[in-house]
Structure formats: structure tokens, C-alpha cells
Amino acid sequence: MIYIKLFLNFFMIGALSFGGGYGMISLVRDTVLSNGWLTESEFLNFIAVSESTPGSIAVNMATFIGSSQGGILGAFLATLGVVLPSFFIILLIAAVLKNLMQYASVNAFLSGIRPCVVAMILATAVRMALPSLAGYTKQASDQTGTSAFHPDLRSVCVFMILIAIHFLYKKFQKRNPSPILMILLSAGLGILLWN
């Protein structure tokens, strides 16, 4: 049954992910693609929508994916699954260990986890950028497993414009541009270039 599958999959994602929502993206991607819930392109669209709406990206993704697979009940169960592990872990930490960071083993554990989280986020970013910008796809029909590059010039153009604006804004304003304005700008560029 899809509802139990959504809850259990997102519960495992919530329990096994470190690094917040961005750390979860690679696990969510593997889960939805392996279950056939979304295609790569649909998943990228879900990330864009999840990032553009208020709230945690992990909760938003669970809600959107659950909704696409099981309607309102699917959205509720997927969201519940992804937040329950964090809720129980934080509750346990707050109840049992008041000064958790004073323990050397906890600091050592977190020091070991940090590079892994950065690597997972970077690997996910590269795996998402290759099909989105460079048009890199593994040809499923080809038995040799060859790869093909078909760059999407419009995507590359939007990416380069946003990078240029980011650096120019940082140079002249001495701070990062507003993420909301960058999202609105990229939406406007999308309407202009893909319409």
C-alpha cells in the first residue's frame, strides 16, 4: 500500500539523514527514483518548488512527493514520517542530555559527520547539475552504457546570469543578494526564455 510505503520511506530518510534538508536530498532522490514515484526531471522541479516555498526543504519535499503519490493522506504521512525521527531525537536529547556538547565523543562524532554531509550535498548538486545544465544522460537503451552530452543553453544562460548577479551584488553591496529576489529573477528568466 502506497501510504505505508510513503511513511516508512520518509521515516527512514528522516532517521538516517544528517545535515538538514540539503543532506536529505540525495536520500530522497534515490528513494523516489528507485520507487518510480518521479522522473529525474520531475524531481528537479519538486526541489525548485520546495526551495521556493516557505518552510524546510525536507518537509516541503516530503509533502509534495506524498501528495503526488497519495493525495492529502499521502502528503500527511510522508511529512509525518520525515519529521518524527527528528522530533523524538531532539526530545530525547532535551530530556536526557542537557549539555550534550560537553562530551568529547559527541564532538568527535559530529566532526566525523560534517565532511560526509558536505560530500553528500556536493554529490547531489553535481548529479542534479549534469542533467539540468549539461544535458548529461546515461542512455538506458544502449547496452554499452555510453553517455551523451546535450547542453541546455537556456539553463546554462540562466545559471551564468544568476552567478554573475550574485558576484556583482556581493562586490558592490558587500552582502549576498536576497534568495527571494534570486528565485523571482530566475522565474522571470524562465518565463522569458522558455515561453
Image (cartoon, helix red, strand yellow):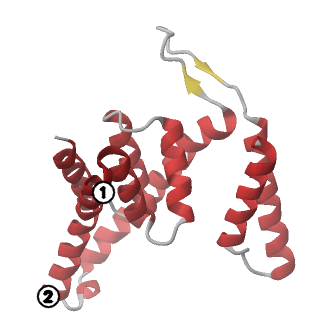
Q: Which mark is on residue 94?
A: none
Secondary structure under badge 2?
helix
Say which quarter of the image contains residue 132: top right
Could you classify mark 2 by the number of other residues whose Cα lies within 10 Å: few (under 14), some (14-19), or many (20 or more)? Answer: few
Vertical arrangement, residue 122 with respect to residue 148, above or below:
below
* Any part of residue 19 in sight: no
Q: Which mark is on residue 95?
A: 2
* Any part of residue 31 in sight: yes
Vertical arrangement, residue 134 with respect to residue 67, above or below:
above
Say which quarter of the image contains residue 179: bottom right
Quadrant of the snapshot with the C terminus: top right
Percent of width and height locating residue 79? 30, 62
- For marks 2 and 1, give the CA distance: 33 Å
Mark 2 belongs to which amino acid? Ala
Secondary structure under badge 1?
helix
Vertical arrangement, residue 140 with respect to residue 106, above or below:
above
Q: Which mark is on residue 72?
A: 1
Is 105 situated left or right of 61 in this image?
left
Name, please, the residue furthest toward the front: 72
- Seen at 70% across and 26% down, the residue is 150
Task: Tell me which numbered mark, 2 or 1, is placed earlier along the sequence.
Answer: 1
Is 6 situated left or right of 166 in this image?
left
Percent of width and height locating residue 13? 28, 54
Is 67 situated left or right of 129 in this image?
left
* Tag nearer the camera, 2 or 1: 1
Percent of width and height locating residue 102? 26, 88
Name the residue nearer the viewer: 194 or 33: 194
- Seen at 21% across and 68% down, the residue is 84
Mark 1 belongs to which amino acid? Ile
Could you classify mark 1 by the number of other residues whose Cα lies within 10 Å: few (under 14), some (14-19), or many (20 or more)? Answer: some
Name, please, the residue furthest toward the top: 143
- Seen at 29% across and 85% down, the residue is 101
